[in-house]
Each structure stands twice: as C-alpha cells, then as structure tokens.
C-alpha cells in the first residue's frame, strides 16, 4: 500500500480566522461556502461572527476598536474580508477591520487579507476598483500589511494566503489611520462619500 503524504504545508498550530463580510443573501452563501472550504483544512478554524450591533456608534473610534478586539476577536490570528459588491459600504466591516489589526493588552492583533467574491462587479481593466473595496482594507493593501486575492475554492491555496497574512502581522505595521465609519456609506464608490 502506497502512503500518500498529506498536503499539510504548514505544521503550525491552528489559525483562528475571523471572517468579515456583508450579510446580504448572496454574500452569505459565499461565506458559508468559504467555511466549507476551510473545514477541509485542519490547520484553520473559523470563529463565530461578532454581534457588534449593540456597540454604541457614538463611542470614540479607539474604544470601539478595543471593545471589538477584546470582546469578540481576542483569539483571532487572521481576519479575512470577503468582498462583494456592497461590502465597502458596511460600517461593521470597517469596524471589524480596524479592530482586527490593533494590538491591545489582551490581544496581539490579526493578519489581514481580502478575497474578491464572484458577486463583486468586474471591469476589464483592473482586478478591482480601489474605491469599491473597504477603504481600510485598501489602506492596508497599499502599505503591504494586507493582500487581496480572487476567490478560490482550493483549501490549500486559501491556507497559504492565511499563513502569509499571519506571518506579515508581526513584520509590518498596519494602517489604521482612517476615521471609523459612523454609519453605512451610500453611493457608487467610497471616494464619493467623502471617506
């Protein structure tokens, strides 16, 4: 009997991954599928979604970020942002990204990556429009802290992306300088919303 080695490229302990996304029906289906993809990989565990709807939006940005980080994302090692057509508009996505990358007394901060869903509107010129992905994610792609990828259902490819984001979290500083959203945004692109 031939022994076939497992495709476990990274023998590190399990990565706890938080998934940030727009809770629309079509994006929820991809979030569910993403969880199925990661279930095939024993090195990755998906954390339950945060219930941040009861956080007072009138608190200062640093307090909001620290509450989300310490109360909901404390154990996460990497945050994955699933990017559909409306994701950039959602205040909770902005808050989750901002909270993910900060370091607090109780948490070391997470790595960050974005995955463009098939629901994202494409054009023929570029992979994505910087103004229709979450602005805080874009800031972190620009400074090298985060990466962005097209949707892929291969669990070993996704595992590599997660591993790379985990490795970057202690080598580069995130950009969390943008003011946090107070409300959801509207319009066709975030630069039109004054963000």
Image (cartoon, grey):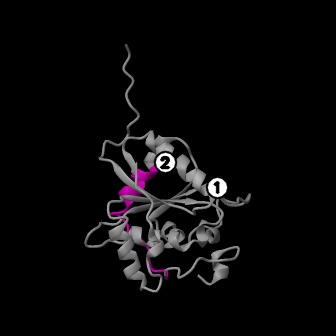
Q: Which residue is mark 2?
A: 35
Across and down, in percent, residue 153 comes to: 55, 43
Residue drawn at x 66%, y 59% is 120
Q: Which residue is mark 1?
A: 26
Q: Relative to 26, is 137 above or below?
A: below
Across and down, in percent, residue 40 comes to: 45, 39
- The residue furthest front is 54
- The residue furthest top is 1
Q: Nearer the viewer, residue 50 or 151?
A: 50
Query: Which image quarter is the C terminus in?
Result: bottom right
Q: Nearer the viewer, residue 67 or 55?
A: 55
Across and down, in percent, residue 87 comes to: 59, 66
In this picture, which residue range is highlighted in magenta?
161-179
| Mark 1 element type | helix
Q: Residues within 10 Å of mark 1 (few under 14, many from 20)?
A: some
Q: Is residue 13 magenta?
A: no
């Amino acid at each position: 009997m031939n022994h076939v080695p497992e495709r476990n490229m990274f023998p590190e302990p399990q990565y706890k991954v938080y998934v940030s996304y727009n809770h629309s029906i079509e994006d929820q289906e991809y979030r569910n599928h993403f969880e199925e993809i990661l279930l095939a990989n024993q090195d990755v565990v998906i954390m339950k979604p945060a219930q941040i709807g009861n956080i007072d939006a009138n608190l200062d940005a640093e307090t909001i970020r620290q509450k989300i980080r310490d109360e909901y994302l404390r154990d996460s090692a990497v945050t994955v942002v699933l990017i559909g057509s409306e994701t950039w508009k959602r205040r909770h996505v902005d808050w989750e990204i901002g909270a993910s990358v900060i370091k607090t007394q109780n948490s070391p901060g997470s790595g960050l990556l974005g995955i463009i869903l098939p629901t994202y509107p494409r054009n023929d010129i570029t992979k994505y429009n910087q103004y229709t992905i979450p602005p805080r994610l874009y800031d972190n792609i620009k400074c090298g802290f985060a990466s962005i990828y097209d949707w892929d259902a291969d669990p070993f490819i996704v595992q590599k992306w997660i591993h790379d984001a985990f490795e970057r979290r202690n080598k580069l500083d995130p950009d969390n300088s943008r003011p946090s959203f107070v409300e959801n945004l509207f319009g066709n692109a975030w630069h039109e919303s004054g963000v």
